[in-house]
Amino acid sequence: MIGIKSIASYVPAQGLDNYAQGAKFGKDEDFIIGKIGSAFLPRKAAEQETSDLCVHAVQQLFAQNPALDPASIDALIVVTQNGDEEGLPHTAAIVQDKLGLPTHIAAFDVSLGCSGYVYGLYALKGFMEAAGLKNGLLVTADPYSKIVDPEDRNTTMLFGDAATATWMGEGATWQLGKAKFGTDGSGAAHLKVTDGKFFMNGRQVFNFALVKVPQHLHELLGETGLAPADVDAFCIHQGSAAIVDAVARRFDEGAPEKFVKDMVETGNTVSSSVALLLEKHLFDSTWQRVAISGFGVGLSWASAILYRE
Amino acid sequence: MIGIKSIASYVPAQGLDNYAQGAKFGKDEDFIIGKIGSAFLPRKAAEQETSDLCVHAVQQLFAQNPALDPASIDALIVVTQNGDEEGLPHTAAIVQDKLGLPTHIAAFDVSLGCSGYVYGLYALKGFMEAAGLKNGLLVTADPYSKIVDPEDRNTTMLFGDAATATWMGEGATWQLGKAKFGTDGSGAAHLKVTDGKFFMNGRQVFNFALVKVPQHLHELLGETGLAPADVDAFCIHQGSAAIVDAVARRFDEGAPEKFVKDMVETGNTVSSSVALLLEKHLFDSTWQRVAISGFGVGLSWASAILYRE
């Protein structure tokens, strides 16, 4: 069974002081840290392409895992909606070349936003199992600094640039359990790019997440025969501090404290958010079972159970 | 095991007379039919979006398969590099909404070009098996009329607009056998979009295909323990009549005649090309085993064996 063997990331060191940005829009520090959740928003350099962020994250993964021979990588998925080129070619091909990965690699991009990591885990595991592949990389990189208008108070305080790389293969500590997915294109207009500028209807997206995500997680647990008490942690998309808190409050006593909130230095990193939480908290933990959930542009959502083998 | 249950398509009735277009560039009818391979190039209407082509193909699939309840669809992949919006949201979400498919559907786009259908088959099968899903739609739609410059003699005589929809699920007549994949991003510049215009280095792409595809198919057959004589048909990407003929000639006696060439009324339809061949020739045939191959932008390639259950 293909599972999660290791996770690494690249978070640019440079970025924006979100308190200073908040002050510009008349938002105090309580709002920035309490509602937005992020004091600092990493920003890629102007000359860095999306593929460069991917390359840094994969190089960090190789550094963490000396046993992983780059020549053994046979599958690569890049989850992004802000890739290098105008539609074609796909960013995964550029990453293959920049990293010097073998040309017998299967590589493609998956177009998804904040739900993309959860989808991507099952897409890569499934593809590898269906095609008989052994060592896969699931890479996320969706630098919203490419599309966010710094004058748009609804979005510029939220998003951070980052990339993550997840090694999937046999003999993994963490395995993928049951998953559930969802899509509602009638909400497509709530998060979209027009003429190169990103638009978000924050209220609609917040309401969508608040209604959909707790219900989806409850359904997933119910269908798996689990109670919230059986889950050691909830690692959900870090859309904002407010949305993580609001989703957590829709769970009974004991569960809200299990919702990991860790975005002070990263912001909302789109499809990288859940991977960043797992990278930091999963492997050194005593956790046996974790619920993950991503939700956003599409609208699209996905929730799953990960369990320690 | 998830396999291919049915395939349908949408090919716009309107389009370009390629003989007339050839005459404009000083190309005679022998060149247009013998080298390019297409007398007619379907073109979507200006007001049709990529998602509309997808919707027509899926509606045709539903019409062909009264037993397939739209409410039972739980997975949807759209293969495209020319989707509706500027990167986000993904076209699959828009297709979900336009078709009124259930919101519990798992939906995402795969970004690949002419190799996309072969990749997509394994991506959807694998994703469905990993996630426990039952009825999936693999949709291809990559209308190059959006990006091809009608004054570019290297590309405007080649590409046609089309969409296909493949129903994947249990109990299928056709199953997916061994597959092989490849990616070489060092050739990314040979097929790319810049400032909204598509560029193709035809000579480089032709040479790539001529070297890579026969070798890849031979390797696939060898690793499967098959000889070309064991395969009833080769359905490869219809890049042009010249490339199909040239690849076929790299096989020993008996095999070249098994290469299906059927693009007179469609042109090079990118990720739809292999699906269009299979739709037309697979299900009413006596074939037991078919080799498929897609190759193009990325550079990216993929070959696989399909077999009758």
Image (spheres, coloured by chain):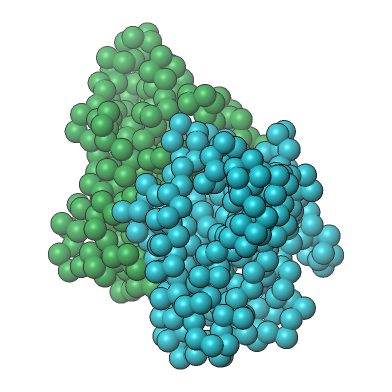
Chain colours: A cyan, B green
Residue under the image location 70 percent in, 60 percent down: A264
Q: Is residue B48 left or right of residue B232?
A: left
Residue under the image location 68 percent in, 55 percent down: A29
Residue under the image location 35 percent in, 53 percent down: A187
* Front in this rendered view, residue A205 or B272: A205
Q: Quadrant of the N terminus of chain A?
A: bottom right
Would residue B272 be visible to someone looking at this image?
A: no
Q: Is residue A250 left or right of residue A231?
A: left
Total marks drawn?
0
Report x, y in % for residue A285: 74, 81
Report x, y in % for residue A198: 49, 41
Report x, y in % for residue A309: 65, 85
Q: Is residue A9 left or right of residue B163?
A: right
Q: Residue A57's quadrant in the figure?
A: bottom right
Would residue A58 be visible to someone looking at this image?
A: yes
Report x, y in % for residue A216: 42, 74
Residue A293 against residue B275 in the figure, above or below: below
* Front in this rendered view, residue B237 or A165: A165
* Front in this rendered view, residue A249 or A290: A249
Q: Residue B135's quadrant in the figure?
A: bottom left
Residue A277 against residue B274 in the figure, above or below: below
Residue A119 against residue A214 in the figure, above or below: above
Residue under the image location 50 percent in, 33 percent down: A196
